[in-house]
C-alpha cells in the first residue's frame, strides 16, 4: 500500500508525457531544430517553478510527510563526466526521440517497438557499469 | 470539458504538472530521476554479482520501479481514454525538414518510418532504435542523470553539474540532428 502513491504519480507522469506530446519523436526533432517553443515551454515552466519551490523548501526547512527535513544532495564536482555523458545521452535522445521516462510511456501507449529502445538503454547502462573504472570521471 | 483534456495539453500546464510531480516525490521522501531505474533493473537482474556498480540494495528503489509501472499505465490511459486521435501538430518548418530525411508529416505520435514493425524488421531500422537506446542508457549513467534528474531536478536546485549535463544533451542532440541524421536517413 505504501507504494500506491508512487503508482499514482507515475501514472500522472505518463499521462503528462503523452498529452504534452513530449513522448513524441517529432516533438524532440522540433525542439533540436529550434522550430517551436513547445518543449522549451514545458521544461522552462517546470524549472522556473522548481527553482522557486526548492528555494522555499530550503528557506523554510520544509519537511517531508515522514517529518524528515527535505534534503538536496549536491552532485560531485566534475566537468568531464557530465559533459561526455550528456553528449552521449543527447545523441541517443535525438536519434530515438525518447529519454528513459517517455520510452516506457510509449510502450504503454501502444508503440511496442519502443521496447527495443528501452531494452538497449538497459544494456547501455550495464555497459557503463562494466567500463566505469576505465572511463574518465 | 472532455475535449479540452483530449487536445494537446499546453506547455505551461504540462510544465506545471511536471514540477508538481517533482515536489510530490520530494514530499514523499524521494527524488525525481527516471534513469536510476535502468541501474536498478540491472541490479535486480543479478548484475551486482559480477559488476560492482550494480551491487547495491536495489530494493530501496522499488518505489521508482512502481513509478515506472505507473508511467506505462499512464501512456495506456492517455491513448485509450484521453486522445482525440489527431496527429501531432508540429511546425511546418519541421515537417519540411523531416521530409528531406524521408520522414513524412505526422499521422500519429510516432513516425512509422522508425517505429512500425516493418521498419524494425530491417537491419538499419533495428540498429537505429538499438543504438539510440544504447546511447541514452550509457550516457544517462555516465552523466549521472537524464532529463528528469538533471534538466528538472538538478536545474531546480541550481546545480552546476546539471547545467553542464544539459549543455551536453544539446551538443549531442544538435550533432545527431544536423550532422549524423542526414548521413543515416
Image (cartoon, coloured by chain):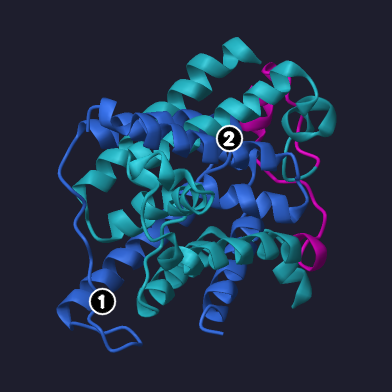
Circle 2 chain: A
Quadrant holding the N terminus of chain B: bottom right
**Label 1 chain ID:** A
Give the x, y percent position of residue A127: 44, 31
Residue at label 2? A120
Q: Is residue A58 above or below residue A106?
A: below
Residue A6 drawn in magenta: no
Q: Secondary structure at mark 1?
A: loop
Left or right placement of residue B42 versus residue B149 in this view: right
Percent x, y of residue A23: 62, 49
Residue B77 image-quadrant placement: bottom right
Q: CA distance from mark 2 to mark 1?
A: 34 Å
**Location of residue B124 with respect to B62 vertically, above or below:** above
Rate crowding at label 2 as few (under 14), some (14 to 19) or many (20 or more) other CA atoms within 10 Å: many
In this rendering, does residue B42 appear at all? yes
For the point 70% across and 25% down, the residue is B126
Q: Is residue B84 magenta?
A: yes
Q: The chain coloured cyan carries which letter?
A: B
Q: Which sits earlier in the primary sequence, circle 2 or circle 1?
A: 1
The image shows residue B4 at horizontal and vertical percentages of 71, 70
Q: Which residue is mark 1?
A: A70
Letter of the chain shown blue in the rendering: A
Q: Kindly report which numbered mark, 2 or 1, lies closer to the viewer in this rendering.
A: 2
Front-lying residue, A93 or B37: B37
- Residue B50: image quadrant is top left
From the top left corner, tell me how far across and down residue B44 is, in percent: 51, 54
Q: Which residues are magenta?
A: B79-107
Amino acid at each position: 500500500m505504501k507504494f500506491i502513491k508512487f503508482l499514482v504519480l507515475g501514472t500522472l507522469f505518463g499521462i503528462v508525457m503523452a498529452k504534452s506530446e513530449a513522448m513524441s519523436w517529432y516533438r524532440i526533432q522540433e525542439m533540436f531544430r529550434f522550430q517551436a517553443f513547445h518543449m522549451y515551454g514545458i521544461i522552462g515552466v517546470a524549472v522556473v517553478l522548481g527553482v522557486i519551490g526548492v528555494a522555499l523548501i530550503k528557506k523554510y526547512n520544509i519537511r517531508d510527510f515522514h517529518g524528515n527535513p527535505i534534503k538536496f544532495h549536491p552532485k560531485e564536482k566534475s566537468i568531464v563526466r557530465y559533459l561526455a555523458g550528456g553528449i552521449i545521452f543527447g545523441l541517443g535522445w535525438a536519434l530515438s526521440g525518447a529519454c528513459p521516462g517517455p520510452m516506457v510511456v510509449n510502450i504503454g501507449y501502444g508503440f511496442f517497438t519502443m521496447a527495443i529502445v528501452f531494452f538497449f538503454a538497459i544494456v547501455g547502462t550495464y555497459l557503463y557499469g562494466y567500463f566505469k573504472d576505465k572511463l574518465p570521471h | 470539458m472532455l475535449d479540452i483534456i483530449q487536445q494537446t495539453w499546453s506547455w505551461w500546464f504540462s510544465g506545471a504538472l511536471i514540477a508538481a510531480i517533482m515536489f510530490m516525490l520530494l514530499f514523499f521522501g524521494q527524488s525525481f530521476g527516471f534513469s536510476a531505474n535502468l541501474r536498478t533493473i540491472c541490479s535486480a537482474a543479478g548484475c551486482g554479482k559480477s559488476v560492482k556498480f550494480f551491487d547495491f540494495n536495489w530494493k530501496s528503489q522499488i518505489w521508482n520501479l512502481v513509478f515506472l509501472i505507473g508511467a506505462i499505465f499512464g501512456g495506456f490511459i492517455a491513448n485509450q481514454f484521453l486522445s482525440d486521435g489527431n496527429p501531432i501538430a508540429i511546425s511546418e518548418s519541421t515537417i519540411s525538414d523531416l521530409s528531406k530525411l524521408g520522414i513524412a508529416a505526422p499521422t500519429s505520435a510516432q513516425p512509422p518510418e522508425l517505429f512500425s514493425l516493418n521498419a524494425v524488421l530491417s537491419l538499419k531500422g533495428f540498429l537505429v532504435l538499438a543504438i539510440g537506446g544504447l546511447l541514452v542508457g550509457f550516457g544517462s549513467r555516465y552523466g549521472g542523470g537524464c532529463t528528469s534528474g538533471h534538466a528538472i531536478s538538478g536545474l531546480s536546485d541550481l546545480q552546476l553539474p546539471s547545467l553542464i549535463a544539459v549543455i551536453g544533451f544539446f551538443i549531442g542532440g544538435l550533432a545527431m540532428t544536423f550532422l549524423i541524421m542526414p548521413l543515416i536517413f
